[in-house]
Amino acid sequence: MNVVKLARPEIQKLQPYKAAVQLDDTVRLNANEAPWSSSGDRFRRPLNRYPEIRPARLQRELAARFGCDTDELLVTRGSSEGIDLLIRAFCRAGIDNIVTASPSFSMYPHYAEIQGAEIRDVALPRETGFRLDPGALLDACDEQTRVVFVCTPNNPTGTTVPREQIVEILEQRRDRSVIVVDEAYIEFSDAVSCTELLDRHENLVVLRTLSKALAFAGARCGAVMGNTAVIRMLNAIQAPYALATPVVECVENALQADQLKQAEDGVALIVSERDRVMNSLRKYGFITRIWPSSANFFLMQVENAETIVNACAQQKILLRFFGGSLSDCIRVSIGSPDENTRLLQVFDTIEGS
Ligand SMILES: *Cc1c(COP(=O)(O)O)cnc(C)c1O
């Protein structure tokens, strides 16, 4: 069975929007565009023209970089858009559900709520260092579970899910659910991308983003990778002309060798700073626990989390407080060496007060 059979029936039948044909060296009187470009327009493809319906070169380059075939990848506006497209494609409102771990990335339940899909949370127990229990995840699934989100490294806990557990989930849910492996932070870990499993597991979808390790959060660019039939279906849902010309051109530049080298050095620096900051924290009495992290952030348990977050904000350093089951925790992103040192200085004043 092809996994698209799990999608909403009306989406399985949906045809992509028929946009105006775009051919080089033609007089284009077919798209109601302006025939002149603005004097401030410095782009290779002038802005008076619509962008490509889908950015072909970027799609090719991202597929090569992330390790899949070109027709197994859709370029998206951040991987957040991929999450939205997947839930809209597979979940019938009021009937189907998604399964996700908790705590994890809040965009999964957010988009499920918009779509009217039930959200099933599987608690990641603190006592086990927030490790995912694949058995518990599978137990939470039923016939109406269309999408399962596995975030590795997980935001906000920094924990990874071992490859054999991902394979077990894929196999147990074969022909029943799409398993979405969100690899937003994979560059900061030792893990190998799950794209190498795409050939064997039709129900696997992998998400990547340029927002973290590639330092392009402002460009809003990511990718969904999966079975070609799934990608074709997501392509039919995504807005035509979704990726704006300035975004496409700046991301193409970001994929040049020199910028990739810079990103790689940046990731190495973040990883070494993560170790430095986490080691320096052991001296503070108000920090009661720090969980190991494979990402560009870490989670710590503290006395009086909200007070500490507010005290740091007073010193113009913003940390992330979630409340709820994490009301005694703070997520800290790793910044530049100077920024991290400033954080430690503020922690010195908190410790002394
Ligand atoms: C930051 C993040 C993303 C990336 O979102 P973009 O829309 O690509 O910026 C995806 N998944 C997780 C878990 C994240 O933390």
Image (cartoon, helix red, strand yellow):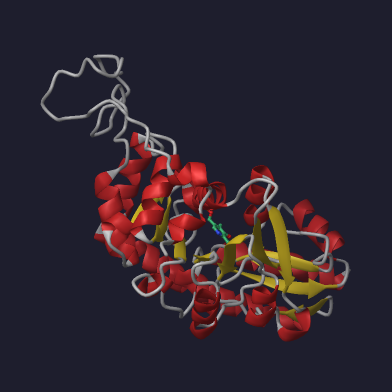
Query: 32 or 346: which is nearer to us?
Result: 32
Image coordinates of residue 351 in percent, x first then y, are 83, 73
Residue 123 to residue 184: above or below: below
Q: Quadrant of the C terminus?
A: bottom right
Q: Residue at x 39, y 34 (%)?
A: 240
Q: Residue at x 73, y 83 (%)?
A: 282
Query: 238 or 78: which is nearer to us?
Result: 238
Image coordinates of residue 341 in percent, x first then y, are 63, 68
Residue 319 appears in the rendering: no
Ligand 1 position by quadrant = bottom right
Q: Quadrant of the N terminus?
A: bottom left
Image coordinates of residue 244 in percent, x first then y, are 38, 35
- Count of numbered tags: 0
Q: Farthest left residue? A: 25
- 40 left or right, relative to 126: left
Residue 160 appears in the rendering: yes
Query: 206 or 250: which is nearer to us?
Result: 206
Q: Residue at x 37, y 61 (%)?
A: 227
Image coordinates of residue 174 in percent, x first then y, are 50, 72
Residue 256 to residue 242: above or below: below
- 125 left or right, relative to 218: right
Query: 304 or 12: which is nearer to us?
Result: 12
